[in-house]
Amino acid sequence: MGSVAHLDVLPVPRGGGSIGAKAKLSLVDALLAEPEARPCAVLALRWLARHTGIERAVCMAVDPESGRLAGLTGLGVPPAAVDAFSLDLADRTHPLVVSLSGGEPVAFHDSGQTVPRPFETPLGHSSFHAVPLGSSQQELGPGLLLLTGAGDGPVTDDVLWAAELLGTRLAALGYRRIQADERRHKRERSLLLAVIHAVTDPILLTDANGRILIANTGAETLLTAGEEKREGWRRAVALNNMLFSASLFTAESGPTRRELLLVDPSEGKELLFEVLSTPVAIRAGENGIVSVLRNVTDLRRATEEIEENYRRLRLAEAATRAERDRLDLILNSVLEPILVTDPAGNIVRMNPPAERMFTFPGRRNSEVERRVQANDAVFTSFVSNLYAGQSLRWRGELNLLDPRTGATIPVEAISGRVVSKHGEETAVVTILHDLTEAMEKALLYEQVKRHSEELREKVREATAELAEQNELLRRQAFQLEQASALKSQFLANVSHELRTPLNAIMGYTHLMLEGVSGEINAAQQDKLARVDANARHLLAVINDLLDITRIESGKMPVQVERIRLSELIDEVMTEVEPVIAGTRLAVTRSLSADLPEIATDRQKVKQIVLNLLSNALKFTPEGSVAIRLEHHGPAGEISIAVSDTGIGIAEENQKTIFEAFEQANSSYARRQGGTGLGLTICRRLASLLDGRIALASRLGEGSTFTLFLPANPRPA
């Protein structure tokens, strides 16, 4: 389709008519004889082409159901372009929709001016007239004609007459079609209702809100009640409606099958229904649910009775099997030999352990057979004594032979008569208990008892010795605690006594370097500078000793406050700026954008970072040093990593580098000096702040010390 981009929209005055009445009458007759809209449009366009000089035309009709203006037929235009053309009537700003609602012809022709909005038509770039179908009194006619001719002159009265005639015919055909559809819908609805009411199962059609739209007689009995019904009936119906409405929510996503318990309003009995629900489209943009309720009350009752009878049958069968297999279970579950004999003394049943004593193995062996026969004779003699007496129980000791090895097995035989309900002896059950283990245990018990007495005496002696050792250890522990306390006190006193004169030395040295006591020459200034540097180094050592002492004694206070790590890093960088200026190292820093404020001891964090950064500058001859701050949200931690490209730390030294007075074993580290307390203090301060320090290093490639601190506030 072409695009109409620059058109004027101007009302066109009507011209005079020149077509005779006979030609117009022929069009009227042809339209009246045609019962379909498209052929009527084809006849009208051909008549206009023959009598008014129209070269190309498109007839568009309004579809009330979809609310669109669609192509109906065309003249001199490809049918595919006509069928593909469609406009939404809700778009009131479209020029063609404006022409349709205006009721007057509108000319669209190229003039260099711009229409309110560009649009496309099946006529391409040609100029055309838009002529509404029907009379001008209609608010929205049945359609629209797009016409092109030899010139851009006004639309003639003949064209207007033909358009009005075609519009009237299309409106009449639409009205007739609507009437036919309504009659067909009524007939189909009547047939559908007759079918629904003929079904005994309740059938309902409900809307999206659960309101009943259609219900047959069975459904009305369950879910509706008039004013003439009694109060119990209406309550039952109200309960059924509530239960049924609640069950509809599960059917909105697709067909469902479920069971629903309702109440019979007439008798008050509970009825079980199988509900089959299916979502359906009621009309455009509105859905409903068709539900069929099948009464399965009797079926469920019969099913339950069958299941109960089947359950009883299974129980009876299980009881029968249990009764039949009871003896087998007793015999086979016992590890000791069990034999059952009849009143004549014959063995009728035995468990597997007894079979190993009283039956022949698969391969025939005379020696084994002799031992089995001997066992049988001994056992038969024992059972005969039971029948000779009047007691129902008999206990005795027998010596049997192991058929495979010939070893003597002492056993205790316990026999009992089995008497029926009528007092008749039916069998004798004998249990053979192997006494070998019991005899061995008795012998072992005597040995254990003797050794126990000996061990008890040794335990008494060892207990006395342990008591002496424990008392000695307690005294040594007390002495160690006193020594540790005295050491900490000594270090604190010595450090304090050393710091006082040392501060005086540093002060006087600084005054002399400043020239307060007079001018000094270069050699003197050099010597005083060395004195000042060594004094500061000694002060740092003393401060480290004091920190270690405080931490070990538990007297190191923690002052928690909210801090910004970015500001703290700025302070650290400012303090080490003179050190950086004296090196050839590139020092960089990177801070994560989502760093939060944290609650911790600002001074101790600063001391840790300053120590790590000073070590990185000290042990990096050349290269770079980097500080990186990151926020690890899932872990709830903040990390401060100090990386360098320095000498690195060997793997064997990484385990001891954090111990007091320990340093990496390298010539470069020894040249740099130090007490070996810095990293020890850093790790212990990090532990005080609920954090930790991690080390990653390779010898000759550099090191990375990372301080991890909790991002959440430290508990008080």
Image (cartoon, grey):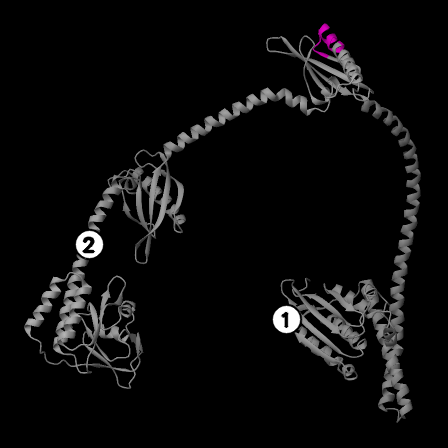
Identify the image quadrant of residue 373. top right
Residue receiving disc 1: 595
Name the quarter where the N terminus is drawn.
Answer: bottom left
Q: Is residue 253 left or right of residue 85?
A: right
The location of residue 22, given as percent across then percent down, is 6, 71
- Asked if the stretch drawn in magenta spans residue 390, the answer is yes
The answer to whether residue 676 is above or below residue 244 is: below
Figure label count? 2
* Sequence-earlier tag: 2 or 1: 2
State the predominant SS element of the stretch in magenta. helix
Segment colored magenta: 381-393
Q: Nearer the viewer, residue 388 or 151?
A: 151
Name the quarter where the C terminus is drawn.
Answer: bottom right
The location of residue 458, given as percent across then percent down, is 92, 37
Query: Residue at the spot x=19%, y=70% of the render?
Result: 139
Q: Label 1 is placed on what type of residue?
A: Leu
Residue receiving disc 2: 182
Identify the image quadrant of residue 217. top left
